[in-house]
Amino acid sequence: MALIVQKYGGSSVADATGIKRVAQRVVASQQAGHAVVVVVSAMGDTTDELLDLAAQVSEHPPARELDMLMTAGERISMALLAMAISGQGAVAQSFTGSQAGMITDSIHGKARIIDVDPHRVRTALDKGHIAIVAGFQGMSRSTNEITTMGRGGSDTTAVALAAALDADVCEIYTDVDGVYTADPRVVPSARKIDKISSEEMLELAASGAKILHLRSVEYARRFGLPIHVRSSFSDQEGTWVLPSEPARTIKEGVALEQPIISGVAHDRSEGKVTVVGVPDIPGKAADIFGIIASAHSNIDMIVQNISTHGSGRTDISFTLPMVEGADALQALKDAQASVGFEDLIYDEEIGKLSLIGAGMRSHPGVSYKFFKALSDAGVNIDLISTSEIRISVVTRADLLDTAVRAVHQAFDLDGTEEATVYAGTGR
Amino acid sequence: MALIVQKYGGSSVADATGIKRVAQRVVASQQAGHAVVVVVSAMGDTTDELLDLAAQVSEHPPARELDMLMTAGERISMALLAMAISGQGAVAQSFTGSQAGMITDSIHGKARIIDVDPHRVRTALDKGHIAIVAGFQGMSRSTNEITTMGRGGSDTTAVALAAALDADVCEIYTDVDGVYTADPRVVPSARKIDKISSEEMLELAASGAKILHLRSVEYARRFGLPIHVRSSFSDQEGTWVLPSEPARTIKEGVALEQPIISGVAHDRSEGKVTVVGVPDIPGKAADIFGIIASAHSNIDMIVQNISTHGSGRTDISFTLPMVEGADALQALKDAQASVGFEDLIYDEEIGKLSLIGAGMRSHPGVSYKFFKALSDAGVNIDLISTSEIRISVVTRADLLDTAVRAVHQAFDLDGTEEATVYAGTGR
């Protein structure tokens, strides 16, 4: 008997039919002899409908009340799923984030988990019940307030709960049958990946592959938890994300015989900020990133240009999620005088492309092949950043698809079967 | 400066426009110098929509999960109202039932309040904030489960919170402008009552006047709390329900000069159970009502007929809410052998009519006039029950309107102005 945590996204529970189908799958897992915990997102469009109502009553709804509003969505879907399961003869109990012990910090709208105490979930499992847990939400221990974790939060709930319960696997159900070597909408010949290390998945997620949220992969890697990404519409095996030994070896810099390229990811959700004319003296970069951190923005790529101003000044560019752009710019503007920079430039017409794979550092041929493919395709490069298992570049947004196809083909990633349609997973 | 608790029903917050209108009224109360706590029901049809979804996924949804589902409704309306208020420049914080300290027993779907600990509400008021509280819901202290209080629960939340906060008044906003001498849909000439004692209001509510829920009136009376029933669509004074001195005198049996008739109430929501052939020995009535109590049914009128069976058997009839009829009948059937009765008869084609007013006991003329009016109108009487300030009769359902009009006219209750339309208040 295994302990399985299953996560179903909003599209899987969009209506009564979907909820009953998920209930069948959950009950079947229990009948196969497993203890089952289910994490569920809000039904289909609920989140958008609630956000629309909020916009109708207030231009700037307070974050605390937005969280209070949003969390109603999972409350509805989880109660309905528990009912549907009990309608099929099993016993289910639903739990809100706070009932399930999802303790977060107090940043409304993008809270982070700081502790998980699922004793009520465990009691339900001990009784042979199926436990349903609201994804995406928690409670702040310091303020006793209801919080939400931002996009991808339900994946994070599932993985964190699986880690706290010492589950055998966390199954993430979605509307695609696994992780692909590239977005099949851009590269129709993309192949499904059967197994991938947590580290590579982390780079894929960070590089914009929307199938699993970055935070959930980080969490799984930290706790050595296997994730199984699969479709809720079939019984096929999907993609296993494994905290594997080879991946760890790569992290330590031990070369493998051949570089293994996992896939190509891309991301259109970021904007680029350039801070122009920063005094080239120690501490200024720290000042700038301190300001961004206090605006709760998540910086991705950072490039500091060489000092070109003669007068000891330099430019610092970085990318960050577009939704956080306005707040970050405002915070920087407020600090212009104290930091002493000259100007701010903000650009949303960019795209990011990343190649992920093990053994890149020891194979200079990889970088060469990568940049040659982009150059042959006529794609100009704006920013570059690399890690042991990833190369990322920022290009013009309108050239991104061309770039993805060129790199995917250059590394012989094309498969033989046509892929099923790929879609984002929402919460 | 007064502390005011305001309750708005679902029809007042049915859409964004309604929510903004309520927000204006709330902010105006605060600007008039008052501390304001708002209790809010779910938006318009939310409850019915959620119940419909529940019916689609399960034939017999578990009560715990139904409560979990239903409480999402107030969560949505209260968060939106808090946003709308902050959009108008005031500061509001919303609280779920459990956050507001509404502690109940653990009977899902019809929980009763056993304690109120509104320290978070008080803290919000101390900061000059407006507190918004979800009506209709609470948390069981023994099971830590979310509970709901059944129909009229939001009124009860408002009154209980007002009592715990030692508020100056509890304002119940609805879509009529007060309490009438009879249902204006049945008696168009019914008059609005300006002031009524808690005791008389209690009898009116218990007799089927749907404007205030019985439990909330009981609660207000126990804590000496004034209720002001008024329309959310106008600034007119409504009906004050006062825990007044005269009312107490009446309870103690002191006669007034003239009987004061408050109004005529009617109720079509009850069914009549007759337990036929009960052994006429001590303890059998207790057995029967013990069985009904354990099925969590609320019995209203009880009549034990004289023993007509020769063999020492009697019939016991009582009325109870129709929605509880099936459970109560099943519980009685299960106990037929042990109690030893012969048969059960259940009748839903009944109506209840009540005349409420102070000083009835000391004025035998009241009963005479009451029964004569019914007799003149050709209305046959099935059951009778009386208290110091009320006479109730059960008639055939199809004669109820005729009976109400006849009694209303006999006691000169007809007003001169046409009444506004009367409607139930839902939760």
Image: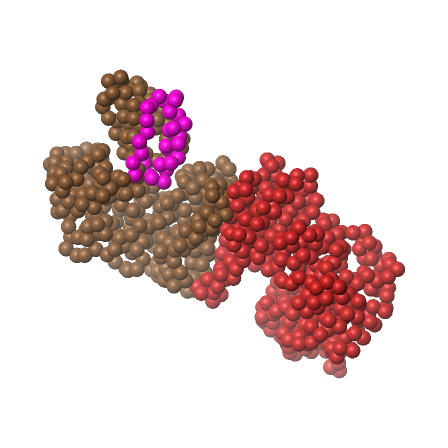
Chain colours: A red, B brown
The residue sitting at 60% across, 37% down in the picture is: A128
Q: Residue furthest front?
A: A417
Q: Residue furthest right?
A: A257
Q: Is residue B345 magenta?
A: yes
Residue range highlighted in magenta: B320-348
The residue sitting at 63% across, 56% down in the picture is: A174
Compare residues A103 and A201 and report the one nearer the observer.
Answer: A201
Question: Horizontal and vertical percent for residue A61?
Answer: 49, 62
Which image quadrant for residue A188? bottom right
As drawn, B242 above or below B343: below
The residue sitting at 72% across, 49% down in the picture is: A226
Q: Is residue A313 visible?
A: yes
Q: Quadrant of the N terminus of chain B?
A: bottom left
Q: Residue furthest bottom?
A: A310
Question: Horizontal and vertical percent for residue B413?
Answer: 15, 48
Number of dots carrying numbers? 0
Q: Is residue A186 magenta?
A: no
Question: Horizontal and vertical percent for residue B100?
Answer: 45, 47
Q: Is residue B162 visible?
A: no
The residue sitting at 51% across, 37% down in the picture is: B143
Question: Horizontal and vertical percent for residue A272?
Answer: 66, 73
